[in-house]
């Protein structure tokens, strides 16, 4: 008898305990995404994901969104466009996530744009380039600092023209992102009557650039705009170092992918000096906003464990910023209503660790915040040097500028 | 009599399959099964098409991605130029794939074994480079497409594509089954075992190889065509991805190449595992799991799943008891 009473009591306690826990603990808010964790985009994808995870941990430490914990549902899309439609259908129809983030880069994102438009879902973009221009989805917001499509080439050519550049050479990888950049570069050059004296595309995975650089040199351009991918960026700089590029060249670089990643930068070392290239975030005095330093302190520690890019300037803080914007929008609208969140995101300017972000009607940044920076005084084989300011001096945009262009290119290389 | 009864069972099975697929599109509201199912059906059709040449004739084609990509880009080009409907896109892709298959068939005149396989890889690279420089279809930058409105009785385009892909599977399996049981299938088996001996005994080897290449190519390209509308996006590196070649080959080998049911079983097993792993483990490990599966089958069951089943079910396959 005694034992039975005890059992009954214990059961009652257990039931009551569970009941009260269920009241206190609402289900988490689920944010779904795919992320390249294998394949060609994996390096960037993992760094981006770490940025988002740091945001999740920060927001959960503060009590979550609307008093509910934030949970991430992440699948690997293998860097491929053919994987993402099924993954996003699963996220929406099976996992019933509350909000969607896009995978890193253009190729995996492009196939899900029509899907989110058709379903009327909010999608936070993650560094894709002009994926919404043809789809016209009004609930798409890209975290990347690109801005209007032509601003990338325009800012580089501004710098070039100020340095006295009058003719352009274009060297482009036969790959999606590089070709898009080259397209806008040709348009901008045409508008400004800058003759394109050399226009060469090369197949992906080219390693030997000596002959191409010789031909480029022979065309005697004074602006060299390069849109390349990580392995070829290294090959091009090696060839330039061996052969030289001529004293006419005022400015060299522009759209070289890879020179943002720690491994490639430390590998190339002093070959980088003088190159003017795009970037998204750099450890320069103008780039620190509320929370930026704290973010990188955490990132630097966790990057070792997660085995991702030790610097993480290029993608990670923008992953965090994506979360900050969601935090602000959900907080202000006090709901998870996607239309309301989208309206809030479009109508307001958002404070983030990568600076203020405001969107135009197409969901891209109102103004470009893509940096053009020049490598200076870089030594060989030293990752840590890139953590100090002055190694990549920001030349553009004007309000973030920390130095002026050294020109011509051969002088800047020394 | 036995054969006749088999045929009735087969076509009844096909009818049940198509009816099940069609009713699934009408009943199930959740769209995810259609997205995942489409991919699995696509791999079934690819694996069956591959095994017509790779299994029956023993010519290992590594250029599945070339045929698939040609299908995708035929659809893209046609859709962009004329807004052609899906059926026309698929038919055109089949014709182009058949022509390409004819070209590959001519290669078999001079090349056999590993050399033929390498030539098919080269073919994929050449075509991919061509597409990369073809600005009309977006070149290396890729192209986004807008689906036209869906036709009744389907309420979403993905459901329609799922059904269309199911029909392609039926066509592929029907053709593979026909070839296997016909004079042509026996000829192909003869030339697989010993091409010279087959030629000497009067098997028209070149004609058979050409026809097998053309049929296999046409099917693969036809399977690729709806992928353009499935993704609503096409870029050369995704469309000509080597994964298609590796998967088609692995699925056929795991299933067994001597009977048409082999690639079907292999594709169902491997395709569903891939889809399942993509949303469960979702990391480098899923590549590892597939690799281990392939190694286990190659070592433990060199004749694939049907090789394991044969003692019990006595499949009349491979010409040997």
Image: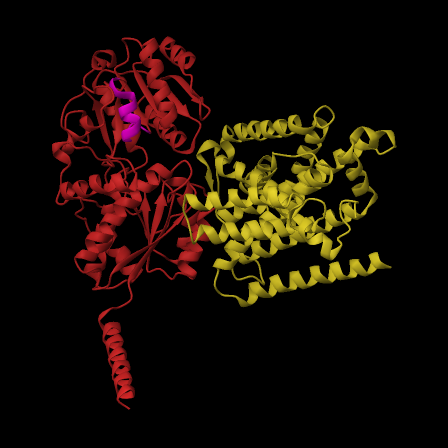
Seen in the picture, residue B158 relative to A48 is either above or below; the reply is below
Q: Position of residue B192 (x, y in %)?
A: 75, 35
Seen in the picture, residue B49 relative to A171 is either above or below; the reply is below
Q: Nearer the viewer, residue B281 or A130?
A: B281
Q: Is residue B115 left or right of residue B150?
A: right
Q: How many marks?
A: 0
Seen in the picture, residue B160 relative to A225 is either above or below; the reply is below
Q: Main secondary structure of the magenta part?
A: helix
Q: Which chain is red?
A: A
Q: Position of residue B232 (x, y in %)?
A: 48, 46
Q: Which residues are magenta?
A: A258-270
Q: Position of residue A113 (x, y in %)?
A: 40, 49
Residue A265 painted magenta? yes
Q: What residue is rendered at 71% in x and 36% in y?
A: B58
Q: Position of residue B4 (x, y in %)?
A: 83, 58
Q: What residue is rendered at 14% in x and 33% in y?
A: A399
Q: Nearer the viewer, residue A239 or B158?
A: A239
> In the figure, what tint was chain B given?
yellow
* Residue B285 visible (yes or no): yes
* Residue A260 visible (yes or no): no
Q: What residue is rendered at 63% in x and 52% in y?
A: B265
Residue A53 painted magenta? no
Q: Quadrant of the N terminus of chain B?
A: bottom right
Q: How is the image coloured?
A: by chain
Q: Is residue A123 left or right of residue B247?
A: left
Quarter where residue A99 is shown: bottom left
- The extreme bottom residue here reads A1
Seen in the picture, residue B245 relative to A153 is either above or below; the reply is below
């Amino acid at each position: 008898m005694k034992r039975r009473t005890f059992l009954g009591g214990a059961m009652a306690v257990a039931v009551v305990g569970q009941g009260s826990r269920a009241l206190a603990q609402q289900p988490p808010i689920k944010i779904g995404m795919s992320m390249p964790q294998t394949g060609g985009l994996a390096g960037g994808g993992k760094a981006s994901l770490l940025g988002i995870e740091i945001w999740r941990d920060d927001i959960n430490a503060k009590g979550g969104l609307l008093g509910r914990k934030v949970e991430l549902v992440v699948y690997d899309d293998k860097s491929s466009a053919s994987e993402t439609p099924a993954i996003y259908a699963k996220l929406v129809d099976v996992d019933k996530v509350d909000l969607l983030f896009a995978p890193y880069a253009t190729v995996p994102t492009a196939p899900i744009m029509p899907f989110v438009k058709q379903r009327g879902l909010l999608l936070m973009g993650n560094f894709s380039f002009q994926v919404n221009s043809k789809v016209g989805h009004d609930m798409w917001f890209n975290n990347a600092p690109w801005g209007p499509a032509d601003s990338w080439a325009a800012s580089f050519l501004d710098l070039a023209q100020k340095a006295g550049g009058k003719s352009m050479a274009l060297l482009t990888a036969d790959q999606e992102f590089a070709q898009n950049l080259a397209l806008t570069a040709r348009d901008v050059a045409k508008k400004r009557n800058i003759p394109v004296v050399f226009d060469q595309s090369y197949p992906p995975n080219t390693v030997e650039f000596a002959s191409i650089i010789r031909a480029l040199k022979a065309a005697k351009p004074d602006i060299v705009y390069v849109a390349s991918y990580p392995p070829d960026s290294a090959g091009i700089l090696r060839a330039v170092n061996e052969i030289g590029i001529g004293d006419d060249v005022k400015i060299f670089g522009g759209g070289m992918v890879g020179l943002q990643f720690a491994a490639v930068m430390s590998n190339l070392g002093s070959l980088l000096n003088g190159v003017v290239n795009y970037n998204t975030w750099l450890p320069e005095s103008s780039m620190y906003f509320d929370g930026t330093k704290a973010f990188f302190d955490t990132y630097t520690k966790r990057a070792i464990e997660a085995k991702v890019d030790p610097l993480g300037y290029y993608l990670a803080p923008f992953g965090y910023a994506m979360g900050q914007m969601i935090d602000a929008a959900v907080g202000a609208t006090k709901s998870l209503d996607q239309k309301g969140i989208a309206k809030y995101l479009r109508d307001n300017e958002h404070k983030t660790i990568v600076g203020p972000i405001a969107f135009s009607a197409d969901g891209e940044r109102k103004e470009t915040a893509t940096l053009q920076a020049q490598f200076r005084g870089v030594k060989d084989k030293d990752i840590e040097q890139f953590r100090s300011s002055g190694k990549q001096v920001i030349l553009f945009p004007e309000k973030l500028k920390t130095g002026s262009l050294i020109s011509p290119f051969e002088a800047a290389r020394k | 009599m036995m054969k006749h009864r088999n045929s009735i069972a087969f076509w009844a099975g096909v009818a049940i399959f198509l009816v099940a697929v069609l009713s699934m599109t009408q009943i199930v509201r959740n769209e995810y099964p259609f997205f995942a199912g489409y991919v699995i059906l696509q791999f079934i059709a690819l694996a069956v098409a591959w095994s017509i040449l790779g299994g029956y004739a023993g010519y290992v084609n590594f250029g599945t991605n070339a045929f698939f990509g040609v299908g995708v880009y035929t659809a893209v080009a046609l859709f962009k130029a004329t807004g052609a409907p899906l059926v026309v896109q698929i038919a055109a892709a089949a014709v182009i794939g058949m022509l390409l298959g004819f070209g590959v068939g001519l290669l078999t005149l001079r090349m056999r074994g590993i050399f033929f396989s390498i030539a098919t890889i080269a073919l994929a690279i050449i075509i991919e480079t061509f597409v990369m420089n073809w600005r009309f279809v977006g070149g290396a930058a890729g192209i986004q497409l807008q689906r036209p409105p869906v036709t009744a009785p389907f309420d979403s385009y993905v459901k329609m594509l799922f059904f269309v892909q199911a029909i392609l599977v039926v066509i592929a399996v029907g053709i593979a089954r026909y070839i296997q049981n016909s004079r042509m299938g026996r000829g192909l088996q003869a030339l697989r075992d010993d091409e010279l001996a087959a030629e000497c005994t009067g098997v028209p080897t070149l004609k058979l190889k050409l026809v097998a290449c053309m049929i296999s190519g046409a099917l693969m390209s036809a399977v690729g065509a709806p992928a353009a509308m499935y993704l609503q996006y096409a870029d050369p590196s995704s469309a000509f991805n080597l994964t298609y070649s590796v998967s088609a080959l692995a699925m056929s080998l795991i299933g067994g190449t001597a009977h048409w049911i082999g690639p079907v079983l292999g594709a169902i097993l491997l395709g569903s595992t891939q889809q399942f792993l993509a949303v469960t483990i979702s990391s480098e490990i899923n590549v590892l799991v597939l690799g281990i599966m392939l190694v286990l089958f190659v070592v433990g069951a060199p004749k694939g799943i049907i090789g394991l089943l044969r003692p019990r079910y006595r499949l009349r396959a491979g010409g040997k008891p």
